[in-house]
Image: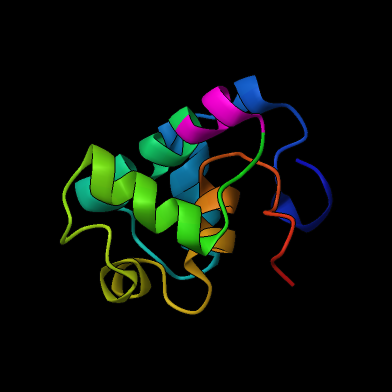
């Protein structure tokens, strides 16, 4: 793991590693969390960078459903900073515009 728990090597990601990182943040990953993480990983594979909030919402809406692409839904799953937490748990670099 790299500084601040973002993975240094993307292939090192697994559901177990994501669950472990989430547990450290007092969050238990469910199937709903994992499908968002998978969408974020696909976004990264396609574009080469981690999605910030707006692209994350658009991609989740496109790939899963409009309801799941709403920021309120993502905030419920990943409280605080959804894009940053999704990237962290998905084994992706921190999105560029996230503090």
Residue 1: image location, x then y, percent: 75, 40
Can residue 57 be spotted in the picture?
yes
Chief secondary structure of the magenta portion: helix
Q: In this view, does 75 lie to the left or right of 44?
A: left
Q: In this view, does 12 lie to the left or right of 60?
A: right
Residue 47 painted magenta? yes
Residue at the image position 36 percent from the left and 52 percent from the top: 58
Residue at the image position 44 percent from the left and 53 percent from the top: 56
Q: Is residue 17 left or right of residue 37?
A: right
Residue at the image position 63 percent from the left and 40 percent from the top: 92
Q: In which quarter of the image is residue 98?
A: bottom right
Q: How many labels does the image show?
A: 0
Q: Vertical placement of 7 versus 60: above or below?
A: above
Span colored in magenta: 43-48
Residue 5: image location, x then y, percent: 71, 52
Of 43 and 32, which appears nearest the observer? Answer: 43
Q: Vertical placement of 23 versus 46: above or below?
A: below
Of 99 and 69, which appears nearest the observer? Answer: 69
Q: Vertical placement of 68 versus 75: above or below?
A: above
Residue 7: image location, x then y, percent: 70, 39
Q: Residue furthest right?
A: 3
Residue at the image position 17 percent from the left and 56 percent from the top: 66
Q: How is the image coloured?
A: rainbow
What is the quadrant of the C terminus in the image?
Answer: bottom right
Q: Vertical placement of 88 versus 81: above or below?
A: above
Can residue 30 be spotted in the picture?
no
């Amino acid at each position: 793991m790299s500084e601040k728990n973002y993975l240094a090597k993307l292939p090192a990601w697994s559901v177990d590693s994501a669950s472990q990182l989430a547990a450290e943040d007092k969050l238990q990953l469910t199937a709903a969390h994992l499908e968002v993480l998978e969408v974020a990983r696909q976004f990264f594979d396609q574009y080469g960078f981690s999605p910030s909030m707006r692209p994350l919402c658009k991609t989740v809406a496109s790939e899963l459903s409009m309801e799941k692409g709403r920021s309120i839904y993502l905030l419920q799953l990943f409280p605080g900073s959804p894009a940053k937490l999704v990237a962290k748990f998905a084994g992706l670099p921190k999105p560029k515009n996230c503090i």
